[in-house]
Image (cartoon, helix red, strand yellow):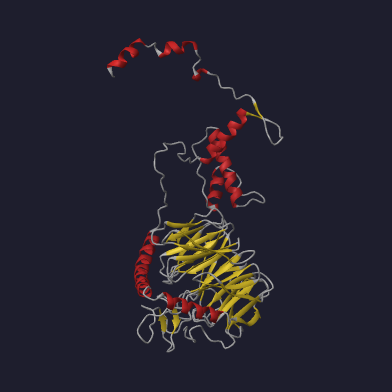
Amino acid sequence: MHPSRQAYVEDAEPEDSKMSGLLDLADVPVDHDHFMPNLSGANPEKASAILAQFNRKRLAATIAVPTDDKRVRARLREVGEPITLFGENAQDRRDRLRELLTQQAEAGDDDDVDMEDGMGNGDEPNEEYYTEGTNELLEARKEMARFSLPRSKKRLGYQKVESTITLRSHVKHRKAVREWLSTIDLFGSQIAAERPLAALEFSPNGETIAVGSWGGDVQLLDLPNLNKKQVFKGHHDIVSGLAWAPGATIAASNVRAEDVNLATGGGDGTINLWSLVQSTPLATLSGHESRVSAVQFHPSSKYLASASYDGTWRLWDVKTTTELLLQEGHSREVHSLSMNEDGSLIATGGLDSIGRVWDLRSGRIVMYLDSHMGPIYALDWSTDGYRVLSGSGDGFVKCWDVRAVKEQANIGAHTGGVTSIRWFQGRDGPHSLFTKDDGSPGLGRDAPDVDKSGDPLPKVSGTFVVTAGLDHTVKIFSADDWSLCKTLKAHVGNVTGADVTNDGRWIASSGRDRTVKLWGRPDMDSIYDNPME
């Protein structure tokens, strides 16, 4: 201390002597036994009761409650309570379990209550908790990594060459694509089932349509006549998930007719795997506790992903029919999912209005799709591997860039909700599957096509998007500026599904009016029959 201040400090009176006549704030009695006025006009409540409610909510928030409904039921059984009540859904059941565990904690019987360290040191970093997976899942993740990395390398090499194409060439090409799309119109219509239709998908060779109905059956229709070829009956409720195996129906591919060609998910919570030579399933995958709303094969054909209204999505081994992964994360039902062509990422969308992008090789979430105002009913990836589209009950389609981890575009697509999205995959992309003119399988290109002078040409793959909505329409949007190219009107009910063949020759849609509509050019030309000049 400076000498000039020493005298003042020594002569100063002790602080306690100055405050001796005053009341210490710590000695002031705290009285919560008074009423708090209520501005809404209701009866006033005591402050002590209000504080008790806050403390109770704070305690309830620190109690960890499982999100899987099966585990919630098991926990209720452990504490001696009914596992379900009349009219109670999964969320109500979880809230009831939280209430019961809170009561146990208040009573001091907290031996069985798993509580988070909610009142711990605020400086401690948040920890992430993981459930240890099986050795089968570990091997599957390694296999998907070995499969996806070379495909990513091939795609990046393709895009490197593609980046040398001039802007003028791209503009001219996209204009020609729009003009071709404007000529598409209704080509045919067929009543496909006795009950409304829920989903449809073209076979990889573009010669067959698989259609799922609310009656639990799957119809295979030929093209372009839409005549019934085959019927699969294996579900007892709505067939809302359909997926063809990669390479199925492709000439000279390694997928034979007697192998697994098609997967279907039903309202009965099961997934059936079908061949094309018998009317009964080759195998049935069981495990979901509620409706299976979407299924999709991994690009390697070895694995199958499924989304369900039990709040989970799962990964299955197609060969052994075993469940490899049960993934939680959504607070409500999971309605849609889609994997990118590299086989490295999967996007899932739920009725909680939130989408998530997961890395299949590590299990981690890499991005949230969190700006929709309604349930996410549809998802689909671009051939570029890093953009994904989401369609929602709010009527909007959003484009998300996984590289930049942000929303890239917002398109007002339909009134009443978007039910289906198909980003045109084409047959000139790095991973496109198609049948060549000589009958051999086309498995993608290493580089874009070139013109007479050897300069690379823009590809048709990924240039447009087909959407379906609850406004009874199917719409085609350009994938560069997201402008509307064509609106297709013929359905008299909600359109539940839409798809486009890899050659762009046909667009098909299904609806609650029980019909399949086929859209195309009057001359039945594909988009590759006329050079985009």
Spot occupied by residue 172 in the image (x, y as percentages of width and height): 47, 79
Spot occupied by residue 312 in the image (x, y as percentages of width and height): 52, 58
Residue reaching furthest left? 3
Spot occupied by residue 494 in the image (x, y as percentages of width and height): 66, 69
Spot occupied by residue 107 in the image (x, y as percentages of width and height): 55, 32
Quarter of the picture holding the N terminus: top left
Residue 30 visible, this orientation: yes
Residue 345: quarter of image: bottom left
Q: Is residue 520 above or below residue 27?
A: below
At x 44% / y 76%, what residue is drawn? 170
Q: Is residue 136 above or below residue 215?
A: above
Q: Is residue 14 above or below residue 43?
A: above
Of 271 and 351, the residue lying toward us = 351
How many callouts does the rendering have? 0
Of 234 and 153, the residue lying toward us = 153
Q: Is residue 444 above or below residue 118?
A: below
Residue 201 visible, this orientation: no
Of 446 and 257, the residue lying toward us = 446
Taking the image as shown, residue 439 lies to the left or right of residue 29, namely left
